[in-house]
Image (cartoon, grey):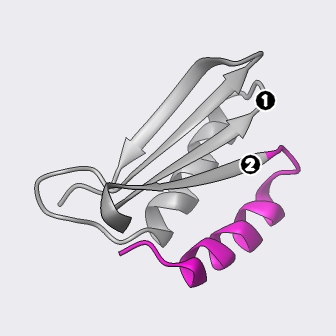
Amino acid sequence: MITQRLLDKLTTSLGRETELPISFEIQEDGMFLLVAVEAATNEQAGQRIADLVDRSVPRRHGDDSWMVIFTQRGKVVDSYFGGNL
């Protein structure tokens, strides 16, 4: 379950990793977290952010529990997902 406490911890952790604007959206009755990063990124930075989210968000059986998208001028330019057991 995605909780406000988890979002607070994730916000702090991601703030240490990047200064890019980040927003969160909890979906599927608290079982899925969409993280949107509003900036171009390189593959290494994207992977580091995805790894941090993967370590923080609980996994679930049969479906992903998170997705990180990187946007530029309102268009998705990269994405990572995971959390499926």
Under circle 1, the secondary element is loop
**Where is residue 75 drawn, in percent x and y?**
64, 15
- Callout 1, which amino acid? Ala
Residue drawn at x 62%, y 49% as measured from the top left: 48
Q: Residue at x 88, y 50 (%)?
A: 19
Q: At x 61% / y 17%, what residue is drawn?
A: 77
Closest to the observer, 29 or 19: 29
Label 1 crowding class (10 Å Cα cut-off): few <14, some 14-19, many 20+?
some
Majority secondary structure in the magenta region: helix
Residue 72 is situated, as x and y percent measured from the top left of the image, at: 74, 19
Q: Is residue 73 above or below residue 16?
A: above
Magenta stretch holds residue 75: no
Q: Which residues are magenta?
A: 1-21
Residue at x 58% of width, y 78% of height: 4
- Expressed as whole percent of the image width and height from the top left, the position of residue 46 reads 63, 38
Residue 39: percent from left, percent from top: 78, 29
Q: Residue furthest front?
A: 29
Please identify the quarter of the rendering in which residue 81 is found.
Answer: top left
Q: Residues within 10 Å of mark 2 (few under 14, many from 20)?
A: some
Q: Where is mark 1, residue-wise? A: 39
Check the image and report above or below for 78 versus 75. Answer: below
Three-letter code for the amino acid on which mark 2 is drawn: Ile
Q: Which mark is residue 22?
A: 2
Q: Quadrant of residue 69?
A: top right
Marks 2 and 1, Cα distance to the nearest angstrom?
9 Å
